[in-house]
Image (tube, helix red, strand yellow):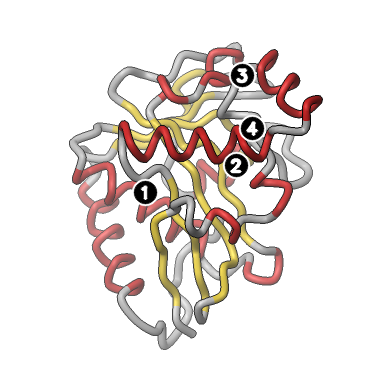
Amino acid sequence: MGRRLVPLTLDNLSELPRRCRACVFWELDPVSGDAAVTAGRSELEKEAWISAVLLEWGSCGRVVQVDDVPVGFVLYAPPAYVPRSMAFPTSPVSADAVQLMTAWINPSHQGQGLGRMMVQAVAKDLLRRSFRAIEAFGDARWKEPACLLPADHLLAVGFKTVRPHPVSPRLRLELRTTLSWKEDVEMALDRLLGAVQKEPALRPL
């Protein structure tokens, strides 16, 4: 089974699930987001956001492909590009971190280590760009796929809680201080270069 992660661009934005292509939960502040949905322009706002971030900051997402079929994605950006992040009781995201906004994996491919692989790829990208950490707002009461990631799954792939909260804790993954994590990143990249012969022994996201 061939696995790979490719950068998210306007060219492959259509590979995201339709509900995610039209979701601007993170990309706009709450008032602007509601207005975009009401006016039916949320999909255009999503495209505009991705275009602006790509031009001003660079890569802000990855699409997961298995045998050339898209089965998941991850989005991330500095907090200055994520207006919704300021609406949380555990904000703000630290100045030295990039925010892991959201991620999704097709249910038919869950439990195969793809979630951890995505986080590793993001970590590798940010290490190259001299960031110190990834932070995310977790959902401590997660029950079904939504814009926030389950807090327990973030903990399972190496994040630590920095601002506790009963609903939306803020979690952080240090990039430069954990040698074992960097080794995991390198191994994950090796796996992404070609077909995987066997399932990696990693906990899934």
Q: Position of residue 191 (x, y in %)?
A: 34, 74
If you read the primary sequence from the N terminus, does the residue marked by circle 3 or circle 1 appear first? Answer: 1
How far apart, in angstroms, are the residues tagged by discs 3 and 1?
A: 25 Å
Do residues under tags 4 and 2 come within 8 Å of each other at their CB atoms? no
Check disc 1 and report the residue beneath it: 122
Q: Do the CB atoms of the residues marked 3 and 1 lie less than 8 Å apart? A: no
Task: Please identify, in this view, whether the residue under mark 3 or under mark 4 is nearer the observer.
Answer: 4
Q: Residue at x 32, y 18 (%)?
A: 95
Determine contact: label 3, label 4, CB under 8 Å. Answer: no
Q: Please, what secondary structure does the residue beneath circle 1 have?
A: helix
Residue type at mark 4: give it. Answer: Val
Instruction: Report the disc number at residue 24.
Output: 4
First reached walking from the N terminus: tag 2 or tag 1:
1
Estimate the spatial distance between the alpha carbons at disc 1 and disc 4, rounded to whole Å. 21 Å
**In which quadrant of the rendered view does residue 40 lie?**
top right
- State if disc 1 and disc 2 touch (CB < 8 Å): no
**Residue plotted at (71% across, 52% down):** 18
Type of residue at label 2? Asp
Label 3's element?
A: loop
Report which residue position mark 2 lands on. Answer: 152
Q: Quadrant of the C terminus?
A: bottom right
Give me the C-alpha separation between circle 3 and circle 4: 24 Å
Query: Is residue 124 placed above or below 60 in the rendered structure?
Result: below
Sequence order check: which comes first, mark 4 or mark 2? 4
Q: Residue furthest right?
A: 38
Three-letter amino acid code of the residue under disc 3? His
Judge depth for marks 2 and 1 and give the one in front.
1
Name the one closer to the observer, 52 or 116. Answer: 52
| Alpha carbons under labels 3 and 2: distance apart | 13 Å
For the residue carrying disc 2, how many other residues have a C-alpha within 10 Å: few (<14), some (14-19), or many (20+)? some
User: In the figure, is residue 126 to the left or right of 68?
Assistant: left
User: In the image, what residue occupies the spot 57% across and 60% down?
Assistant: 72
